[in-house]
Amino acid sequence: SNIFFKMVIESFVEGNLQDVKIYIKQNIFKSFQDALNERIKEKEQLIINIKNIKITKINDIKIFKNNVKIQVLFETIQTKALKDKNGEIIDGELDKEIIVSDLWTFERNFASDNKNWTLIETATP
């Protein structure tokens, strides 16, 4: 799950979500893509450097027949900044490490031929 977490964050930062699209529920993908499109329109650049994943912890598990949902807490140390079209930092700081907590919910149907987990929800605890 750490590899997937980093992969999604890097894809979002780079502005190309196609490699992770099949692992993300449509409505979540659309919200990621909308945010990305807005950034492109404004010619903004997002920088996220994940220095360390401190905690990866299963927060909750729900089982409904063949369907399983697992909520995972990711606590990372990262630097994060948003630059405007002129390269000026308008949000965050590149030289300041922050702790960021994310709650991601994954789902899998064991009766399905698809053996992949799907990201169905993202939240901040």
Image: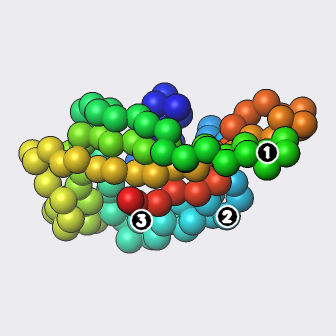
Q: Is residue 92 above or below residue 94?
A: below
Sequence-wise, the earlier of marks 3 and 1 is 3
Q: Is residue 17 visible?
A: no
Instruction: Report the mark closest to the observer, 1 or 2.
Output: 1
Figure check: 40 above or below 118:
below
Q: Residues within 10 Å of mark 3 (few under 14, many from 20)?
A: some
Q: CA distance from mark 3 to mark 1?
A: 35 Å
Q: Earlier in the sequence, mark 3 or mark 2?
A: 2
> Is there a contact, CB below 8 Å, between mark 3 and mark 1?
no
Q: Does 114 appear above or below 124?
A: above
Disc 1 target residue: 67
Foreground: disc 3 or disc 2: 2
Q: Secondary structure at mark 2?
A: helix
Query: Could you tell me the amino acid type at mark 2?
Result: Asn
**Secondary structure at numbered mark 1:** strand
Decide which of 102, 51 is in the foreground and name it: 102
Where is residue 83? Give x, y as percent. Answer: 24, 60
> Looking at the picture, how far across and down is residue 71, in whole percent?
55, 47
* Residue denoted by label 3: 39
Viewer-nearest of discs 3 and 1:
1
Q: Which residue is mark 2?
A: 27
> Residue 37: percent from the left, percent from the top?
51, 65
The residue under label 3 is which amino acid type? Arg
Say what amino acid the circle numbered 1 marks. Answer: Asn
Separation of marks 1 and 2 at Cα, in angstroms: 19 Å
